[in-house]
Image (cartoon, rainbow, N blue to C red):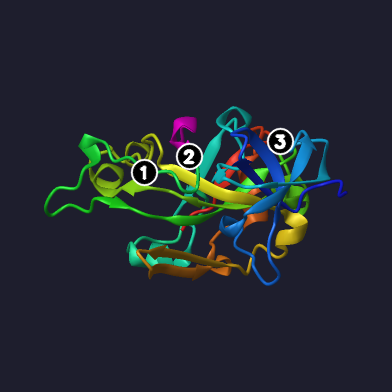
Amino acid sequence: MSERFTRLVRFQADDNITHYGEAILPPGVSDLAKTTQARIIKGDVLGAHRVTDQVVDVKQLVSPLPRNLIPTVRCLGLNYAQHAKEAQMPLPKYPVLFHKPATALTGPSSPIPVPLHAQPIPDTLGVDYECELVVVIGTTGKDIPVSRALEHVLGYAVGNDVSQREWQLKLGGGQWTLGKCCDGWAPWGPGIVSRSAFGDEGNKAIRTRLNGQTVQDSVTKDMVFNVKETVSFLSRGTTLKKGDLIFMGT
């Protein structure tokens, strides 16, 4: 029995009850989406908990945390040098911050609804994908120094900052939120990898595959502001609460 998780998944079992569990993966497999069994976790996954020896089958993976445990969803824009270059925009001097409502959060395999006002029309940019590293805050803090920022990180996940470019860039009055805030436009998961198991967050591959084709391919070392800098900056005068999510840009 382990004291803390390293690869957390939240899932429905055959009993149709939603559980937290430590993912059991075959040797050589790191994709949490392939989890078919897990060891049940007892306690508070954001606090005191333990991984038990009880193994159950995974019927369906859902979002790693329920919405009621996520106080705030913060997102960064233009946080990859290559993305800024593609957008023909200068590198930001400070992190470009916007928020998504909790209603945007959804599971890793949930359908992404596109409401009528966001439906693509001819000669517009339409709905787009943005695969991102997601930081999960594990310890509440404010005015956190860069040197201690990672102490406040519970772990990492993957998210999709779904965006409607017309509303983001042309119709939103200079604010991005209208192009990013629809229900279901922040799918994330399929689990949370602990900070210790994840290792160096500054050199991880980030890829998006659409219908089997790779449409995004980058590495986290291309981030303009790394995780430590971002956590510290966003905590200036502002409390980061445990359970907060930070989408780190694309």
Name the residue type under label 3: Lys
Name the residue type under label 2: Thr
Q: Secondary structure at mark 1?
A: loop
Q: Which residues are magenta?
A: 97-105
Q: Label for residue 90?
A: none
Q: Secondary structure at mark 2?
A: strand
Instruction: State the CA–CA distance, disc 2 to disc 3.
Output: 27 Å
Q: Along the polypeptide, which appears first: circle 2 or circle 3?
A: 2
Q: Which residue is mark 2?
A: 106
Q: Which residue is mark 3?
A: 142
Instruction: State the CA–CA distance, disc 3 to disc 1.
Output: 34 Å
x, y (%) of residue 241?
A: 67, 33
Q: Which residue is mark 1?
A: 112
Instruction: State the CA–CA distance, disc 2 to disc 1.
Output: 9 Å
Q: Nearer the viewer, residue 90 or 176?
A: 176
Q: Nearer the viewer, residue 37 or 174?
A: 37
x, y (%) of residue 124?
A: 17, 52
Which residue is drawn at the image coordinates 64% and 55% (left, top)? 227
| Mark 1 residue crowding within 10 angstroms, few (<14) / some (14–19) / many (20+) | some
